[in-house]
Image (cartoon, rainbow, N blue to C red):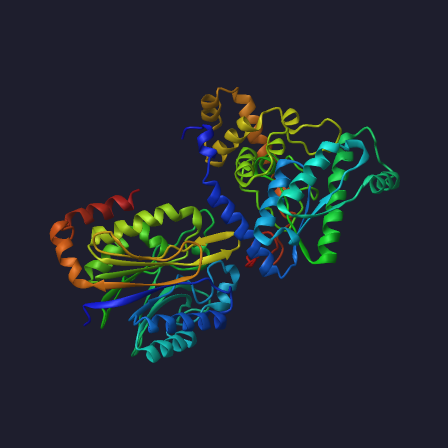
């Protein structure tokens, strides 16, 4: 298998149809009124929002913009509004700063210097808002996680990846960009550097240490059972670098699963309860 | 025996786990097919219950013949037509041994059943977890000639359809629940199986989304030369009618005589090699 950008190129019209059909089917079968999702102004949430609007009509999609003081960026808000306007999505803007401050104050062991723990608190707080809206208004929470993030575990457990459906989760980041372009997400959003906005100035590629176009090909190779050596050779990378991505992918399995338990009885959640879902 | 007749490809989605609702849909489609003078109506794999049923299969499986086949037999009698559909079958000798089965009923009631031989248990498929493979070829004499039955993944194994042809089937029916990522394989293999057997092949796939799997539809009737005689929509429910004329087989068989040129000695070799793979 040749690891080139071409392997990531799909029939985007077909992908768009499949995802919109999936969203519509899930919402209908759940008897929910529509979709609620976090609208960050980034390419993933913009694409998820646009596809939800295409599936259900914009009036059944609610995008929550949930900024906070520390990472506040007017361009992100501008981009979120741009997408909402273009695809006819309803929005609500809620500043979560006071909630975060109250939370931080109430945690006896809170450490303001630990930016990861503090950042994760932000992602989990946003999840609380999304689920309140979903619960109250009978909406489905639509996640925006992509396959690259989920494979390497670059997300907050029970935070940004918490959702009822994640329609982009089988597309690598570079593929989400291609799909975004295809469905008309504004270029300035498609091309801006991705960030989980957990702390100021954070960018995904800097933190991961790889550009997404390279990371995605490594992950694609791993997905297709390719050996680390082969991937490294084809992409002209150090073997260690590919090995580290592989280790990270394997080590993060705990983030992708329902909590593990010890099997004690006849049929067990997460093991061998095989119930149909929608 | 009829030399010419119409076949209806009833490409439906299922209400998962709801046999009554699915039987109602089978009845509606059979009626519509009857209005088009179809003598045979074909429904997808596990169309009585839905495909991705997991542990629910134990509750849903029935004996064949049994209560659900009896209802479908009545529909067939009413329209004086043949119906093929799929359902989970409970073995008559055990309490929880299941088969993935295709059922053929006709104007005079139950005709026969075929238990799927090749059970996909890889990728997203878990069939072998629940089902025991069948060991018998499904080829049944009817007023529409001998009809061979295969199910979905059987299509990847030329010997499955070949056996029905060697039993005398001139129409091979493949009922299926194929998700969209596998469309290319099926579009190629359906034509291949028809050509290599110089037989008609009716392929009927499920549509709808079950557990994140989107079934692609695209049901089709293929002639003995590989030409598509009727094709249903992709991804949506549909009913299409195709016409079979067995007289069309002879000229193709003279042009590409695959059956005449079969070399039985190869099959011993195949068996030997397959055992030591």
**Percent of width and height locating residue A26:** 58, 56
**Would residue B224 appear left or right of A7 to someone viewing this image?**
left
**Would residue B16 appear left or right of A108 to someone viewing this image?**
left
Question: Does residue B52 sit above or below A2 in this rendering?
Answer: below
Question: Does residue A259 sit above or below B28 in this rendering?
Answer: above
**Would residue A113 appear left or right of A226 to someone viewing this image?**
right
**Percent of width and height locating residue B44:** 39, 62
Q: How many labels does the image show?
A: 0
Question: Does residue A65 sit above or below B195 in this rendering?
Answer: above
Question: Does residue A273 sit above or below B93 in this rendering?
Answer: above
Report whether residue A266 is seen: no
- What residue is at 22 percent from the left and 51 percent from the top? B195
Locate the C terminus of chain A and report the quarter of the image it occupies.
bottom right
Report whether residue A144 is seen: yes
Locate the N terminus of chain A and report the quarter of the image it occupies.
top left
**Percent of width and height locating residue B136:** 29, 62
**Percent of width and height locating residue B22:** 46, 69
- What residue is at 33 percent from the left and 49 percent from the top? B187
**Would residue A76 appear left or right of B63 to someone viewing this image?**
right
Nearest the viewer among A227 and B178 is: B178
Query: Based on the displayed image, in which of its 4 quarters is residue B23 positioned?
Result: bottom left
Query: Based on the displayed image, in which of its 4 quarters is residue B251 positioned?
Result: bottom left
Nearest the viewer among A213 and A60 is: A60
């Amino acid at each position: 298998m040749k690891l080139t950008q071409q392997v990531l190129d799909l029939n985007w019209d077909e992908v768009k149809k499949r995802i919109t059909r999936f969203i519509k089917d899930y919402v209908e079968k759940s008897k929910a009124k529509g979709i609620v999702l976090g609208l960050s102004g980034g390419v993933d949430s913009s694409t998820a929002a646009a596809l939800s609007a295409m599936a259900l009509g914009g009036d059944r999609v609610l995008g929550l913009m949930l900024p906070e003081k520390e990472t506040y960026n007017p361009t992100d808000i501008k981009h979120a509004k741009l997408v909402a306007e273009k695809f006819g999505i309803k929005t609500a803007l809620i500043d979560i700063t006071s909630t975060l401050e109250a939370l931080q104050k109430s945690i006896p062991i809170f450490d303001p210097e630990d930016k990861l723990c503090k950042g994760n608190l932000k992602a989990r707080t946003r999840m609380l808002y999304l689920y309140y809206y979903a619960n109250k208004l009978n909406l489905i929470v639509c996640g925006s996680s992509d396959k690259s993030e989920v494979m390497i575990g670059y997300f907050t457990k029970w935070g940004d990846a918490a959702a009822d459906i994640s329609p982009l989760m089988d597309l690598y980041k570079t593929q989400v960009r291609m799909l975004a372009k295809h469905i008309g997400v504004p270029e300035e959003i498609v091309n801006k550097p991705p960030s989980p906005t957990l702390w100021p100035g954070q960018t995904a590629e800097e933190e991961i240490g790889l550009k997404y176009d390279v990371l995605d090909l490594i992950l694609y190779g791993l997905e297709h059972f390719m050996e680390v050596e082969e991937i490294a050779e084809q992409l002209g990378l150090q073997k260690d670098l590919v090995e580290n991505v592989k280790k990270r992918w394997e080590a993060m399995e705990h983030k992708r699963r329902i909590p593990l338990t010890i099997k004690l009885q006849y049929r067990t959640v997460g093991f061998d309860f095989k119930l149909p879902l929608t | 025996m009829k030399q010419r007749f119409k076949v209806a490809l009833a490409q439906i989605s299922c209400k998962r786990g709801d046999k009554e609702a699915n039987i109602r849909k089978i009845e509606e489609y059979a009626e519509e097919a009857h209005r088009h003078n179809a003598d045979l109506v074909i429904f997808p794999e596990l169309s009585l219950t839905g495909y991705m049923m997991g542990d629910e299969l134990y509750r849903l499986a029935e004996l064949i013949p049994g209560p659900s086949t009896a209802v479908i037999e009545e529909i067939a009698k009413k329209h004086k037509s043949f119906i093929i559909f799929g359902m989970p079958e409970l073995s008559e000798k055990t309490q929880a041994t299941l088969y993935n089965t295709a059922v053929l009923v006709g104007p005079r009631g139950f005709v026969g059943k075929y238990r799927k031989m090749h059970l996909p248990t890889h990728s997203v498929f878990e069939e072998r977890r629940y089902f025991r493979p069948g060991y018998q070829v499904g080829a049944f004499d009817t007023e529409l000639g001998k009809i061979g039955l295969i199910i979905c993944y059987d299509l990847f194994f030329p010997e499955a359809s070949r056996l029905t042809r060697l039993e005398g089937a001139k129409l091979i029916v493949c009922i299926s629940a194929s998700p969209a990522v596998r469309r290319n394989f099926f579009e190629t293999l359906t034509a291949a199986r028809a050509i290599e057997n110089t037989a008609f092949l009716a392929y009927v796939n499920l549509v709808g989304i079950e557990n994140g799997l989107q079934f692609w539809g695209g049901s089709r009737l293929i002639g003995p030369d590989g030409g598509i005689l009727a094709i249903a929509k992709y991804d949506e429910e549909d009913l299409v009618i195709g016409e079979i004329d067995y007289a069309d087989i002879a000229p193709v068989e003279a042009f590409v005589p695959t059956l005449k040129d079969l070399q039985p000695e190869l099959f011993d070799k195949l068996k030997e090699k397959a055992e030591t793979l």
